[in-house]
Image: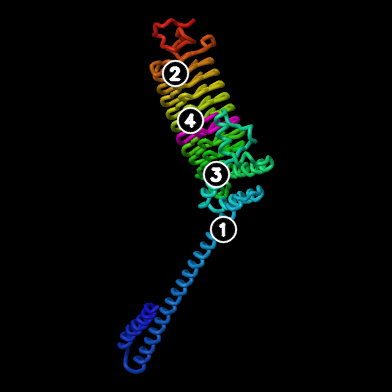
Amino acid sequence: MLIAVAAVALTAFGVTTWLLTIASHASAGTDLTTARLDAVRTGLAAGGGAGAAVGLMLAFRRQHHQEIATLLTDQDATQRRITELYTKAVEQLGSDKAPVRLGGLYALERLAQDNLSQRQTIVNVICAYLRMPFQATPEGTATTAGEEDAAAARTETEIASALPDNIRQQEIQVRLTAQRILSGHLRQEGARQPPAEIALSRLWRDISLDLTGATLIDFNLVGCFIGDARFDTAIFSGDAAFDAATFGGDARFGGATFSGGASFDAATFGGNARFDRASFSGDARFAKATFSRIARFDEATFGGDAGFGEATFSDAARFAETIFSGDARFTEATFSRTTRFDGATFNGTSRFTGATFHSGARFAGVTFNGSARFSEATFRRGPASLNFQNALVKSPGLPHAWPDGWQLHENGVSGATVTPISSTTPVLE
């Protein structure tokens, strides 16, 4: 403030002094006096103008500071309001009344829709709710595959399984709502909209899911986009649908249990896909799925048919020790890197018709209990890139079609083995 006053005074003094200097050159008498008076008036006017300018500047600064203070106050109020709404919604999720829990979920959904910075946090809360122990079916009708898995599921959900059936049904509705909130905002329906409309759409981008160990009921993420996805040891009660879903990061389903059908047709796995030790009780479909990184199905169990027709494996594919109880279809699949089926068991028909292997293919120690069909399969590196060491064919009487350069031979014990045509072992007729 003092600097501004000094600047005004200096301006008035400087202008007056300069004008008086000019006026001193005027002729003596009335002209000299008039010139001096004009110089003083002009100098004072200049000082007044400078003062007005300084006053305007100071007023602007005061207004600017007031606006900043108001904005900060509004932001603080907004943050407090968000915190209050968030806290209240989370408290509602802990209620013993299903309608209150539903209200909490819808409140969290509205909060996430209106506040981009809060979305991942709110999704984490919803996922945490779904991870809470719960048994979707009454005790004694567990949907897990195998008695050991069923016993483990009952142990983990002792409290939930003791619920009266009406309470369980209410909780199922709450969980279905939580699942629908996730799928409804992750589905890529707005992907083709103009950018301005996408910003206002229901699509939540760059969201990761952590549903490790969760009990999920008729889970549906068809057409959804997910960042990192963790479903390790999750229990999928009913059918699970991931058709045309896009996993931007790693997709982890290690040890997951699928009690019904599992569909991943045309799904895209941008990161590593891990289904090791997963259990599929019904049919599992991965037709036209794209695996951009490593795909691991080691020690997985397929209780129904397993369909990988026209799937693309851009990196290594691993099916070591995997059990295929039904038919295994890899028709016209593409394997770009080394593929391992070491120790796998094919109880039904295994179809590799028209498949393309760009690198090595290992079937060492594989057991074929059903028909094996490799007709029209292409091995870019030739017969030497295949490994059927210790592979056992227990159904030599069934129709088989082995890769070029390989044939079925008696092993003198049970069934037959697959050996190169150059082998001197007698060919099984």
Q: Amino acid at mark 3?
A: Cys
Query: How busy is the neighbourhood of tag 2: few (under 14 within 10 Å), some, or many (20 plus)?
Result: some
The colour scheme of the drawn protein is: rainbow
Q: Amino acid at mark 2?
A: Gly
State if disc 1 and disc 3 touch (CB < 8 Å): no
* Left or right: residue 117 compared with residue 15: right
Which residue is located at x 54 percent, y 60 percent?
Answer: 80
Query: How busy is the neighbourhood of tag 3: few (under 14 within 10 Å), some, or many (20 plus)?
Result: many
Per the image, label 1 sits on a secondary structure element best described as: helix
Per the image, label 2 sits on a secondary structure element best described as: loop
Q: Which residue is mark 3?
A: 127
Q: Which mark is residue 365?
A: 2
Query: How busy is the neighbourhood of tag 4: few (under 14 within 10 Å), some, or many (20 plus)?
Result: many
* Left or right: residue 371 compared with residue 359: right
Q: Which mark is residue 276?
A: 4
State if disc 3 and disc 4 touch (CB < 8 Å): no
Q: Amino acid at mark 1?
A: Glu
Front one among 152 and 380: 152
Residue 258 in view:
no
Residue 275 in view:
yes
Q: Is residue 49 above or below residue 121?
A: below
Mark 4 or mark 2: which comes first in sequence?
Answer: 4
Q: Which residue is mark 1?
A: 84
Which residue is located at x 61 percent, y 49 percent?
Answer: 105
What whole-number distance in Å separates the C-alpha atoms at marks 2 and 3? 41 Å
Q: Residue furthest right?
A: 166
Q: Quadrant of the N terminus?
A: bottom left
Q: Is residue 190 above or below residue 7?
A: above
Q: Is residue 188 above or below residue 200?
A: above
